[in-house]
Each structure stands twice: as C-alpha cells, then as structure tokens.
Image (spheres, rainbow, N blue to C red):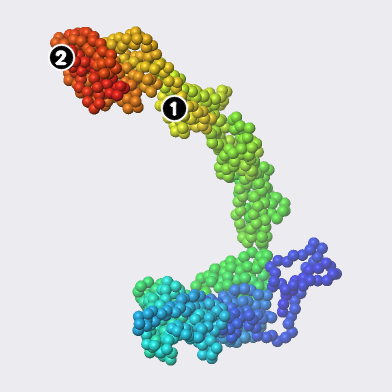
C-alpha cells in the first residue's frame, strides 16, 4: 500500500502528494487536508537495481571510485537484508545509506585505499523487500578499472654521430604525452622527412601506417603505457666512430606513479635492462650494428626500498587466533595462518589503509605507516552480533517511517512499523524520532537475538530559564512563544512555559532593549536563558580644528568602533553602539591630541576642539654690522625675529632655529642672533615652535638674507701691537704730520682675527707697529692674526712692520719668512746698538738723509741687525752703513727694526 496526503477547498479538486516526500505540509487558510491509502492488489515483485555507478560494463573506471546503486521497491526495501560481494569478498558492512529515496535507498561503498589497476570487478547484490512475503533481488554486474593518467610532457632528444673523420653530426626529435594524443600518427605528431644524411627518428607504433612510418615528433596518450623506439639512420652505410642519444635530465617528467626508462635493444629484441632517465643524461647505441634506443613510459617505477607488515589476527572477545582472515594493505592481500599470523611485503614508505575480514566477524578498517622499516600490526576482529527486531508505534498505532538509531545502527521502520538491526552483544542507547513527536530515548542490553518494540507518544515539555537585562536578571521581561500570549519574568528573572513537541520561536522583550529571539526544537524539558542588550545608540563627535576653516582630516578613535576621519564639517558619527563607557581620542598632525571618556546610554554628541601648534609668523632676517670696521664688542651676525599669535589655546615654550634646513639652536626668546655667518654668504632661516606637551608646530615661512658688508672707507690700516709702548700713537702722529688722514687704527694689542672687525682687503696698505721685548707685556700677534697678514701679503698687499724685536719675537713664523731676511740680536741698551740711521738712496730713488737715533735708550734695546736674502734689499743702514736695520721685498713688504 501507499499513503497519500492532499489539500483543497471543501467540495473542490484535491491535489495529492506522496507522504514519504514530506515531514510537514503547507495548507491554505480556506483548505482542508485529505488522506488516502492505495492498497496494491498484485502479488508483489522483487526490488529493482537502478543507477549503478560504475555502470555495468564500464571500462577505464578510476581506481579511486566508490561503488553506488539505488534499490527501489513499491512496498519498501528491507535494508537489513542487503548483502554485497565484490569479486567474491563480502563488503556488505562497508555499504551505507547515502540517500533515502521516495521508494527506496541509494547505497554506497567507498573501498579502502584504491581499486586495483586494469582489473575486472564483479558486484554481486542480494536484497529483499519488506512485503509480508518477502521478494528477493539476486543480481550481478561487472566493470573494469583503468589506471592513473600520467603527466603530460614534451622531451627533446638529441642524437649524435661522430664520423671516422672526427666530425660530429646531431639531429633532434621530440617525444611526449598528451591527453588528446593517440598511439599512432595524429595531428600532434610530425612525420620525418625522407632521410638525406644522418637522421634520428621515432618508429610509428602503428605498423600498418605505411604513409608515416617514421616521426620526428611522437606524442602518445598520457593515460596509457607507451614504448618509443628511437632509430639512427646512417648515411651511405657508413660506420661511425660513436653514436649516442642525449636529453636534459631536468626536462624528464617526475611523477609518483609514472616514470621514463631507457635501454638499448634491436627492433625485434627489447632491452634486458632499463635505466631511469632522471638518473642518466645520455645512452650509447651501436647504430651501425642495428641497435636502437627503447624509451618506456610506464608505471613500473620500482627501485625504492620496500618493507613488510606482520602481525596476528585474534578474536577481540576471546583472544583466540583467527585462521583464514583476509588482510589487505596497499592493494596487497594475505590470509592469516592457523596461529593467526600474516605477512604482507613489498610496501614502500607511506601510510596505508588496512582492511581485515573474516567470516563471522565485523570487517575491521584501520591504517598503518611504513617508515624505513618493517612494521608490526596486530588485528582484533569483533564477532558478528545479533538481530534485534520489533515494531515502532506512534500513539499506540504501528507506524512505519520512524527514524531509529540503535547504538551504531541506523534505520527506518518499514510498513507496519517493522524494523531490524544487527548488533554485537552490549548495552546500547536507542533513540527514535517521528515528525511532530518527542524523541524516544531508551537503553537496551543485547545478549542475543531479541524482540524490541518502540512506542512514541505525544506530549508537552516545559521550557524555563532566566531572562536578564544586560547581564542582570530582571522582572517584567515578556516571553512569547510563536507569537502567542506572553508570560512575564518574576522578581528573580525566572519564567516557565509549556509547549508541545516541535520547533518553536521564543522572543524576549523589554522596553528600551533589543528583542532577543531564538528558534529551537523542543523535544524534552529545556532550559533557555535570555540576556537582552540595550538598543544601540549613535555617538557623534564634532571636531573643531583651532584656526582652521576646514575641519577635515582629524583621526577620531573610539574603540571598539572602527576609526574615522573627519569631513570638512568636522562631524563623524558612530552608529549601532552599545550603551557603555567609551574613550574618544582625536588627533591630527600639528594639533594637540585630545582624549576624553564618556558614558553614553542614549544618542550622544560631544564637541572637541583640537588646539593648533601655531608656527611662528612674521619672520624677519637682517645682518649687522653693515660696514667695517665693526664697532668694538660687536661681531658679524644675522638677527632673526618673529611673532606668535596671541589669544591661542596653547603657548610655545621654546623655538628651534633652522638655517638652510638644519637645526642650529633653540631659544625661549622671540629673536635670535646667528654669529656663524660670513660676509658674502646667503642664508635661509625658518623657526619651529615647541610646546610644553611635546607638540611641534610646522615650520614658519622662510626668510632669506644675503650678507654684503660695506668696506672700510679708509685706505690705510694701522695695527697697534706695541704692547702699550705708545709707538703706534707715534706712527699715527707721523702719518698726520705728512698729511695722511684716511687711516684706521686698531685697538691696543687687538687680535683682529678674533674680533673679526677688519678685512685687510679693504686697505691699500697695512702698518704694523710692534713693542719692545722685555719692557712689560711681550704679547705677540696670534697665529690666526699672523695668517691674515700672510694671506694679505700673498695676495699682493703692502705691509710695513716697525719694531726692534720682530725678528726675535716672531722667529720661525711664516710672517717673518715673507720678509726674506735673517737677523741677529744686538746689544742691550746699556751698550747700545744704533747711534744714527742712514737712508738707502737706491730704495729712496736718489734721496738720502741721516738721522740721529736714541742711542743707549729703551728704543735701542736689542735692536736686530738684518741680512736680506732672496731678492730683498736694504732700506735703512745704521752707524756709517755698518749694519742693516731695514729691508724691503718688491717694494711691498717693508720691515725696520727701529722706530
């Protein structure tokens, strides 16, 4: 019989459906439900085999295939009667129900490991229906496996001939595999042209193809083993000195199942041995003697070390040995001996599936790993169990279609509620479910074949729990079931509601909080708690950037929300936020970072102003002094000044001064003097403000200054370095007496190199007046000051030095060397040195006069006596030309040891 369900308006047409296809049924609000039973009047037929996969007669079946088929019957299929043999081995326990069909089942078996390559398999099926008088299907079909397809590749081969004259000839051909290739000539191959000279060809495996018997490109199918025969064609029957074949080892395909092997034989006699082409790159062949090269594309890739798996097969319950158990590992099979021992060899390193089968025992599936050695694997088989059969009842009525899980067994009851499961001895949990009813649960001890009935009854179940508001149990929360009348939680947050078996939707509600909804299958008393969260809120942050018209680009962070950048308006909003405490951080370059913490339980807006790190403005640059000589105690410098905005939120604490892009100093003032400058230099300055909170402003607008100091207007520089003797004042009086007034006089003993007040290049001539050694201060000019005079002299300047002890005080200096004389020290003043002085008339162009000198006075103390050299000439003589007391060189450098 068959049960149908239908729907339609009263008195109208009814639309019928097979009830096996539904667990629930939709009906219109104005319709009613109809049921009908069709009782077959026939005597019944055996189940039918439908859609076997692999199909009967199939070839080249992948060895990784599963075996599946449908068994259908108009009454129903007895799943417990299914028996399947694969090539005579009972594999029934490996089959599972893959799909429940309207009138049967789809069964599938996934063999452990792989099927054997290129093997014929017979599938033998025996199964009965669940009719009162069972009908049996007993049928068989076959299929044939193929193999693993190997890699596709192209490999260039180069044949070489060395002639007796020592010449080397070569010829290239190509072999390979492709899924579209055939064994004979096809569009992937190239025929060989008629041989003219030395040639290398591959012989077409299709010997009936007389049109293209030789190929220069020979591509075979990558799913089939192949043998290429490579022949050398020698010109005119020559006998070469050597012939061989070469290839690039790196181009040889590498596969876990396939390999290329090479050897030498004759057209009618294959090689006795082969080498792996991944291990050699060439092979010699005696082409003149008729030898050819064989290349095999094959799965015979042995050579790796193999190992054995050994062990004993025993009864799991008694521990006794099992004889005749079939053990399969990696496609290799052995049968246990009388003592239960077995051994399977020929296994390389790796992990293998293990299947152990024995009559009267459950098939055992396990695995073993081979790792550089033999392995021991003992196997325990569980004896076959017992039949547990019975009837399923729903509300006391025998009912089929009940889903039963009996320990490890799973089935559906058939017509009239009949079911059977096969189990070993033990205690099992039993569950049975039927649409619209609670799940049946029981525990059963199986000690032998037994009868066991299942009765599923309708009923209601209590769903209870605690409802909370944001983690706190609360009173007044309403709980509704499937949109019905609500129940309300008490002061402890507890609720309880009774519902029938089935899927129900529960909704917990409370004003100001988001509803909590869940849908569950109620099949027993159930605890269901709720925790309602406040409805989400929006938090907006209005950012104002101090001094800016555009408030965009500020980074607003409010974990755990994603950070945001402000638009020109400065406002960003975080949506769908939970109630709670949030820390808001707003930052932007050149603005002070502001952080604040808020607690929000409603839509909230907060205003935040970012203080700006104002940069200095109004930057001015100028230099001073502007003319030489500089005033005393004043050196050349640039003067930089700036301002900062008033009325701002932050005030800078100090400033960094940059010159030409590099920082040079810091100051707390609004001005700065830079003394590290030179006349003629151009300098660019910027200033950056530093703030107490560590903030740094942008750089100010730059200012640029070019230093151009006006030179001294006087033509003569008088250097007073007489150690306070007053000689320089005497020289000044002398200059004035002869009408020379455009001179500048330095300060007493002033180090003009240190003060920087003078530039000797401003003057036409320089007079240096020195003091007397031993009359007080004996300070001499600094090395830097002497160097200024040396540089001035070397540049062609006029220098006159007056002083009785120049040669003594400046012995060994570059300055003294420039005057080209040597000197000896005279007597002290008590003895005296110079009584009178006479002019050198040659130097003075014919003019000559004589003058008395302050003989035996302080002026006559250790007067140096000079000897010119290197082109220097006398200027003054002393004491009837007996001593030279003045010299000159090129009329530019003049020295006198008297004054």
Gap in Å between the C-alphas at discs 1 and 2?
50 Å
Circle 1 SS class: loop
Q: Residue at x 48, y 30 (%)?
A: 684
Q: Is residue 606 left or right of residue 727?
A: right
Per the image, the residue denoted by label 1 is 680
Which of 300/638 is in front? 638
Q: Residue at x 54, y 77 (%)?
A: 179
Q: Quadrant of the C terminus?
A: top left
Q: Residue at x 55, y 36 (%)?
A: 588
Residue annotated with mark 2: 827
Does the CB distance between marks 1 and 2 fall below 8 Å?
no
Counting residues from the start of the chain, the first of labels 1 and 2 encountered is: 1
Q: Position of residue 91 (x, y in %)?
A: 52, 81
- The local secondary structure at tag 2 comes to loop
Q: Is residue 300 left or right of residue 29?
A: left
Where residue 335 appears, as percent x and y from the top left, is: 42, 84
Residue 355's place in the image compared with 624, above or below, is below
Work out whether 9 lies above or below 381.
Answer: above
Counting from the top left corner in percent of width and height, residue 584 is at: 56, 37
The label on residue 334 is none
């Amino acid at each position: 019989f068959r049960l149908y369900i239908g729907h339609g308006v009263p008195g109208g047409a009814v639309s019928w459906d097979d009830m096996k296809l539904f667990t629930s049924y939709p009906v219109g609000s104005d319709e009613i439900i109809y049921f009908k039973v069709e009782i077959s009047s026939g005597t019944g037929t055996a189940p039918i085999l439908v859609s076997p996969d692999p199909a009967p007669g199939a070839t080249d079946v992948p060895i990784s295939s599963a075996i599946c088929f449908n068994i259908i019957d108009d009454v129903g299929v007895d799943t417990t009667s299914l028996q399947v043999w694969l090539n005579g081995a009972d594999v029934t326990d490996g089959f599972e129900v893959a799909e429940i069909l309207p009138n049967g089942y789809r069964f599938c078996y996934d063999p452990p490991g792989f099927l054997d390559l290129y093997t014929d398999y017979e599938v033998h099926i025996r199964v009965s229906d669940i009719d009162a008088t069972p009908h049996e299907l007993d049928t068989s079909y076959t299929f044939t496996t193929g193999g693993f397809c190997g890699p596709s590749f192209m490999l260039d081969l180069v044949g070489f001939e060395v002639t007796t004259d020592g010449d080397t000839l070569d010829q290239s051909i190509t072999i390979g595999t492709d899924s579209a290739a055939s064994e004979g000539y096809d569009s992937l191959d190239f025929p060989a042209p008629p041989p003219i000279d030395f040639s290398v060809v591959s012989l077409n495996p299709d010997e009936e193809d007389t049109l293209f018997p030789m190929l220069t490109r020979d591509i075979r199918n990558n799913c089939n083993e192949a043998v290429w025969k490579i022949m050398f064609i020698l010109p005119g029957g020559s006998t070469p000195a050597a012939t061989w074949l070469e290839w690039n080892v790196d181009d040889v395909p590498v596969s876990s199942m396939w390999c290329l092997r090479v050897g030498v034989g004759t057209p009618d006699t294959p090689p006795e041995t082969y080498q792996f082409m991944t291990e050699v790159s060439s092979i010699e062949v005696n082409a003149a003697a008729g030898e050819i090269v064989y290349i095999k594309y094959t799965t015979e890739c042995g050579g790796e070390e193999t190992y054995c798996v050994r062990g004993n097969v025993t009864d799991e319950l008694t521990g006794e040995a099992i004889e005749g158990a079939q053990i399969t590992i990696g496609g290799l099979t052995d049968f246990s001996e009388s003592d239960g021992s077995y051994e399977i060899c020929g296994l390389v390193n790796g992990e293998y599936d293990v299947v152990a089968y024995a009559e009267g025992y459950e098939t055992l599936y396990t695995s073993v790993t081979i790792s550089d050695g033999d392995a021991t694997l003992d196997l325990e088989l569980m004896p076959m169990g017992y039949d547990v059969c019975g009837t399923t009842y729903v509300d006391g009525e025998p009912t089929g279609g009940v889903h039963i899980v009996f320990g490890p067994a799973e089935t559906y009851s058939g017509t009239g509620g009949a079911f059977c499961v096969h189990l070993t001895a033990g205690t099992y949990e039993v569950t049975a479910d039927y649409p619209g009813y609670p799940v049946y649960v029981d525990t059963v001890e199986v000690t032998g074949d037994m009868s066991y009935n299942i009765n599923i009854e309708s009923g209601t179940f209590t769903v209870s729990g605690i409802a909370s508001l944001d983690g706190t149990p609360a009173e007044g929360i309403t709980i509704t079931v499937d949109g019905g009348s609500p129940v309300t939680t008490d002061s402890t947050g507890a609720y309880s509601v009774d519902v029938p078996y089935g899927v129900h939707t529960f909704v917990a509600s409370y004003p100001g909080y988001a509803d909590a909804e869940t849908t569950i299958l109620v099949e027993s008393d159930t605890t269901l708690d709720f925790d309602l969260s406040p409805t989400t809120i929006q938090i907006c942050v209005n950012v104002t950037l101090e001094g800016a018209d555009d408030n965009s680009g500020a980074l607003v962070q409010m974990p755990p929300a994603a950070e945001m950048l402000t638009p020109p308006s400065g406002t960003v909003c975080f949506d769908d936020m939970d109630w709670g405490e949030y820390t808001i951080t707003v930052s932007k370059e050149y603005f002070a970072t502001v952080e604040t913490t808020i607690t929000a339980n409603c839509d909230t807006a907060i205003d935040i102003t970012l203080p700006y790190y104002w940069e200095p403005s109004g930057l001015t640059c100028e230099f001073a002094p502007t003319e030489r000589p500089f005033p005393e105690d004043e050196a050349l410098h640039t003067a930089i000044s700036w301002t900062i905005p008033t009325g701002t939120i932050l005030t800078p604490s100090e400033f960094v001064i940059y010159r030409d892009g590099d920082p040079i100093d810091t100051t707390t003032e609004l001005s700065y003097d830079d003394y590290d400058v030179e006349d003629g230099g151009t300098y660019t300055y910027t200033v950056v403000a530093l703030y107490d909170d560590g903030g740094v402003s942008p750089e100010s607008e730059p200012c640029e200054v070019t230093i151009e100091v006006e030179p001294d207007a006087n033509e003569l520089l008088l250097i007073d370095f007489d150690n306070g003797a007053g000689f320089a004042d005497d020289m000044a009086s002398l200059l004035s007496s002869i009408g020379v007034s455009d001179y500048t006089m330095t300060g007493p003993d002033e180090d003009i190199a240190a003060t920087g007040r003078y530039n000797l290049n401003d003057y036409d001539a320089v007079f240096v007046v020195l003091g007397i050694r031993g009359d007080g201060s004996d300070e001499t000019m600094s090395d830097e000051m002497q160097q200024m005079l040396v540089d001035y002299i070397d540049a062609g300047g006029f220098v006159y030095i007056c002083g009785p002890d120049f040669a003594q005080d400046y012995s060994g200096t570059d300055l003294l060397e420039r005057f080209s004389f040597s000197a000896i020290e005279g007597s002290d003043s008590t003895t005296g040195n110079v009584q009178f002085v006479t002019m050198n008339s040659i130097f003075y162009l014919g003019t000559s006069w004589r003058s008395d000198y302050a003989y035996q006075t302080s002026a006559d103390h250790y007067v140096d006596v000079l000897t010119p050299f290197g082109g220097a000439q006398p200027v003054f003589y002393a004491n009837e030309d007996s001593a030279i007391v003045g010299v000159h060189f090129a009329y530019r450098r003049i020295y006198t040891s008297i004054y």
